[in-house]
């Protein structure tokens, strides 16, 4: 008999990419001022910057040369779509527009995969019992299990409407910023052979 299971795993680790560029203000606001504004905005919405924020990259022109402008990129880890939305709003209010969702994962993905495997074999056993009962028999011990796992990668999509988009006329003034994430779908399929008792 075959057994299947489908489990959805919520995304609880969302990584945002924040890029600070002096070129955004045509050199009028230096990188340190932007960094200070970013940190202030993040702390205001409850982010622990020491634990959740890390420097991901610095442009080769980070140290000012004649005619060059600095830039740096940060990665921020948040725990929910709601927290991500608050960060987007706070940074937008602070004039920081280069914020993107880099990736999203589930911190307990292996636990969910294990549960899906267990559910699939329980499903196989229930099917075997149902079929055996239909012909007046019962099942004995399971003597073979084949695991056909299939955890397809998921593309995480987000839709963030910011005040700057509103200002550009892309959305209505009354629209609320929204972030939606598709959970990870875990599919497991097994086949199991049981002894058929007379």
Image (tube, helix red, strand yellow):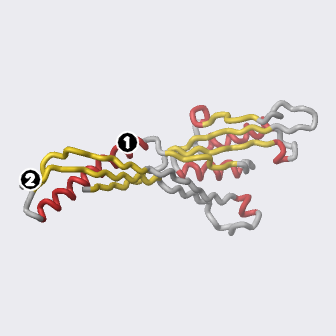
Identify which residue is drawn at 75% across, 42% down.
Answer: 20
Q: Which label belongs to residue 197? A: 2
1 and 2 marks in contact (CB < 8 Å): no
Instruction: Determine which of the numbered discs, if any, sits on residue 186 in the image.
Output: none
Rendered position, 68 above or below 26: above
Q: Residue at x 75, y 63 (%)?
A: 167
- Residue 1, horizontal then vertical, whole percent: 24, 56
What is the number of the mark on residue 111? 1
Image side of residue 187 versus residue 142, left or right? right
Q: Nearer the viewer, mark 1 or mark 2?
A: 2
Q: Quick check: 98 left or right of 26?
A: left
Q: Residue drawn at (34%, 49%), measured in percent from left and top? A: 116
Q: Give the residue drawn at x 70%, y 41%.
A: 38
In percent of width and height, residue 148 lies at 36, 49
Q: Earlier in the sequence, mark 1 or mark 2?
A: 1
In front: 14, or 1? Answer: 1
Whole-angstrom CA distance, mark 1 to mark 2, is 34 Å
């Amino acid at each position: 008999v075959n057994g299947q299971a489908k489990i959805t795993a919520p995304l609880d680790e969302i990584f945002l990419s924040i890029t600070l560029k002096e070129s955004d203000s045509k050199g009028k606001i230096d990188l340190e001022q932007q960094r200070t504004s970013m940190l202030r905005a993040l702390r205001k919405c409850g982010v622990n910057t020491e634990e959740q924020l890390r420097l991901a990259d610095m442009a080769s022109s980070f140290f000012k040369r004649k005619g060059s402008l600095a830039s740096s990129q940060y990665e921020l880890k948040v725990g929910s779509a709601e927290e991500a939305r608050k960060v987007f709003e706070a940074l937008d209010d602070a004039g920081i527009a280069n914020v993107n969702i880099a990736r999203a994962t589930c911190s307990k993905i292996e636990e969910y995969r294990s549960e899906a495997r267990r559910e699939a074999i329980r499903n196989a056993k229930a099917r075997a019992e149902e079929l055996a009962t239909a012909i007046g028999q019962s099942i004995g011990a399971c003597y073979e299990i084949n695991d056909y796992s299939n955890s397809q990668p998921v593309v995480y999509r987000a839709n963030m409407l910011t005040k700057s988009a509103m200002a550009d006329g892309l959305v209505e003034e009354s629209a609320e910023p929204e972030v939606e994430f598709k959970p990870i779908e875990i599919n497991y399929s097994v086949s199991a052979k049981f002894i058929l008792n007379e």
